[in-house]
Amino acid sequence: QVQLVESGGGLVQTGGSLRLSCAASGRTFSNYAMGWFRQAPGKEREFVIGTSAGATRYADFVKGRFTISTDNAKNTKYLQMNNLKPEDTAVYYCASGGSLYNYDYWGQGTQVTVSS
């Protein structure tokens, strides 16, 4: 059974940074696409950033502020978020799947709140 567990969310001031973690079990991350999504209150879930086989796909609002890194030994991926803005406030989810556009397993989410 595949499980994804996010951690690292919290409260940060505008301009600050956070690093989210997504630990996988039951699946080797490096063999699949991995993505981060977010959902703000009252809004639909939206794609943030994803990586697969060396390729990375970004949402326009990322604009170089967010990056993904990997620790293969821990089967964990990280989302480094810099220069955070209040509009980045959302629940962030990691996901794993067959391509950058197709995800079949999701984590439970972690709250990120950016204060102005």
Image (cartoon, grey):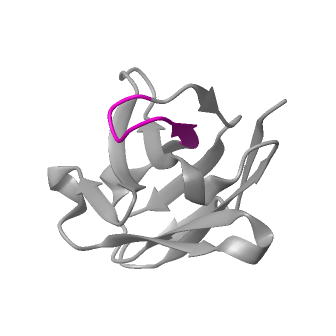
Residue at image coords 63%, 54%? 29
Residue at image coords 57%, 52%? 31
Residue at image coords 58%, 68%? 78
**Percent coordinates x, y for residue 27 in the rendering:** 73, 45
Q: In this view, does 1 lie to the left or right of 22?
A: right
- Answer with the quarter of the image where residue 43 lies: top left
Q: What stretch is highlighted in magenta?
A: 93-102
Number of marks present in the image shown? 0
Residue at image coords 43%, 34%? 40
Is residue 110 positioned above or below 70 on the image? above
- Answer with the quarter of the image where residue 104 lies: top right
Q: Nearer the viewer, residue 77 or 21?
A: 77
Q: Which of 45 and 96 is in front in this view?
A: 96
Q: Nearer the viewer, residue 52 or 86?
A: 52
Q: Does the magenta-highlighted stretch encompass residue 83?
A: no
**Percent coordinates x, y for residue 44 in the rendering:** 36, 21
**Percent coordinates x, y for residue 1 in the rendering:** 85, 29
**Percent coordinates x, y for residue 32 in the rendering:** 53, 47
Q: Is residue 6 left or right of residue 85?
A: right
Which quadrant, please, contains the C terminus? bottom left
Q: In this view, does 18 lie to the left or right of 59?
A: right
Is residue 47 positioned above or below 85 on the image? above
